[in-house]
Amino acid sequence: MATQSLSSLLSISSSSSLRSLGRYFSWGRAINRFSTSVAVEEPIRPTVQIDYTQLLINGQFVDAASGKTFPTLDPRTGEVIAHVAEGDTEDVNRAVSAARKAFDEGPWPKMTPYERSCIIYRFADLLEKHRNEVAALETWDNGKPYEQAANVEIPLVIRTFRYYAGWADKIHGLTVPADGPYHVQTLHEPIGVAGQLVPWNFPLLIYSWKVGPALACGNTMVLKTAELTPLSALYVSKLFLEAGLPPGVLNVISGFGPTAGAALCSHMDVDKLDFTGSTDTGKIVLGLASKSNLKKVTLELGGKSPIIVCEDADVDLAVEHAHSAVFFNQGQCCCAGSRTFVHESIYNEFVEKAKARALKRVVGDPFKKGVEQGPQINGEQFKKILNYIRSGIESGATLEYGGERVGSKGYYIQPTVFSNVEDNMLIAKEEIFGPVQSILKFKTLDEVIRRANTTQYGLAAGVFTKNINTANTLTRALHVGTVWINCYFVFDAAIPFGGNKMSGNGREKGMNGLSNYLQVKAVVTPLKNPAWL
């Protein structure tokens, strides 16, 4: 399967890309300010069955030790989809014990790397076979458009697992020359039992970023799902068992952060933690790791990513990418381009075109064909976003479009565009995690570099310019983990991703993702009468 990144479906730089986008974006569809009422229609009933709601421990789906369950809700209505087993400390202990036994005594680390790769490939094939059901679960539980899940995200998940399946038999150490008669080699060994915590905004995509490299390196793991979106991870983990993954290698716990999450992060028999989520929770994860056994921690956290549109930029290209950068996935992206800096000479043109594009954005039932934006994940996020919008208005920013709830049921919000935004406003400083575009004005490169870097975050950035010197200047000056030039949201399996500053540490995906799950051992052997050194 050819690499399929978000950019391949979000790119607007060619007619072929535009045609492929037709399935997802509704180009040229004019709707007025209130035509997003499609969201209040009777919700479409998904055909997928909810078969897996228990914990996966040691190859078996089992109830929580306490017998407790919790509801997972449909963001379109706030109604219960299913009740899912609520894991707690005892369940985490059982899962870690199973993962430890599978690592110390089981066949997984002792398989040849090629055998491990074959199982991961078989899983990817099964996931491709069941992609429609998986996409439906992701949409039902999360609220993201079905066409986005089926045509963008699940193909990326499949590609990521195939990418790491290909790496399984290519991980090796080095022979190192030393001063003296010694043979020195390095071994790259699996780290052991990994604890993984995935977020609710991209449940399966981030699942693939963590589980893929961990398995390729020969580790076992306990994965905690986000309590808001547990269904898809449980479903696809069953496919791993069908693919031949031995019991105990992958264990899945659904539950809450303060209970199941804290127990996993504090566990003395977990060797590694990998967390994606908010910066505040990342601090807690890091603290629990340090207070227990100093386990290694990889963190991918929040962001307030700048987009810089220079005076020579292709304005139409920049408008479309900036629109996708902040509104994709209902704005619920850690690397959303939520601060759009536009040069003063093209500012008014950009604002008008950004407003016009937002007017065309189709909000509604995510299972309906042509819908670009579904509901926010839950009532808490919904209220938080509306409060930020209110803050923007009260602080003096100009509300160009949106800012209102859509319908009376579910958690739908209009795509919202602000102009005349200043750096000191909350909407320009804090992570909103919602469909709110803030457009700021700048005069010089030095000025915009300083302003773009004046943030606690450092996850990503976008640059729009026709001048390679300007692009190079900005690329090296921005304190972020990823810079996209004349594009945005290029998420290929081979491209490393992660942040600087309070956006986290470490990198996921690509070769760099393997290092999170490996440890290096040096082996030194004396040589007797060597013919050469």
Image: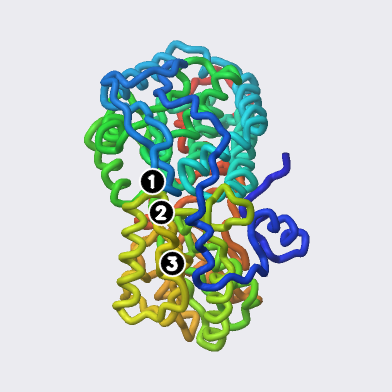
Q: Say what amino acid the circle numbered 3 marks.
A: Val
**Label 3 residue SS:** strand
Q: Say what amino acid the circle numbered 1 marks.
A: Gly
Q: Say what amino acid the circle numbered 2 marks.
A: Lys
Q: Residue at x 32, y 58 (%)?
A: 383
> How far, Cα to Cα, is label 1 from label 2?
8 Å
Q: Answer few, some or many: residues within 10 Å of disc 3's Cα (few below 14, many 20 plus, some between 14 and 19).
A: many
> How far, Cα to Cα, is label 3 from label 1?
22 Å
Q: Residue at x 35, y 35 (%)?
A: 71
**Which residue is label 2 attached to?**
409
Asked if labels 2 and 1 touch by Cβ distance under 8 angstroms, the answer is yes
> How far, Cα to Cα, is label 3 from label 2?
20 Å
**Which residue is label 3 attached to?**
436
Q: Answer few, some or many: residues within 10 Å of disc 2's Cα (few below 14, many 20 plus, some between 14 and 19).
A: some
Q: Earlier in the sequence, mark 1 or mark 2?
A: 1
Q: Answer few, some or many: residues within 10 Å of disc 1's Cα (few below 14, many 20 plus, some between 14 and 19).
A: some
Reply above or below: 288 against 85: below
Label count reads 3
Q: Earlier in the sequence, mark 3 or mark 2?
A: 2
| Closer to the eye: label 3 or 2 | 2
**Which residue is label 1 attached to?**
78
Reply above or below: 164 against 147: above
Q: Residue at x 43, y 16 (%)?
A: 58
In the rendered image, the residue lying farthest to the right is 16
**Label 1 residue SS:** loop
Asked if labels 1 and 3 touch by Cβ distance under 8 angstroms, the answer is no
Image coordinates of residue 422 in percent, x first then y, are 36, 79
Image coordinates of residue 479 in percent, x first then y, are 44, 64
**Residue 499 visible somewhere in the drawing:** yes
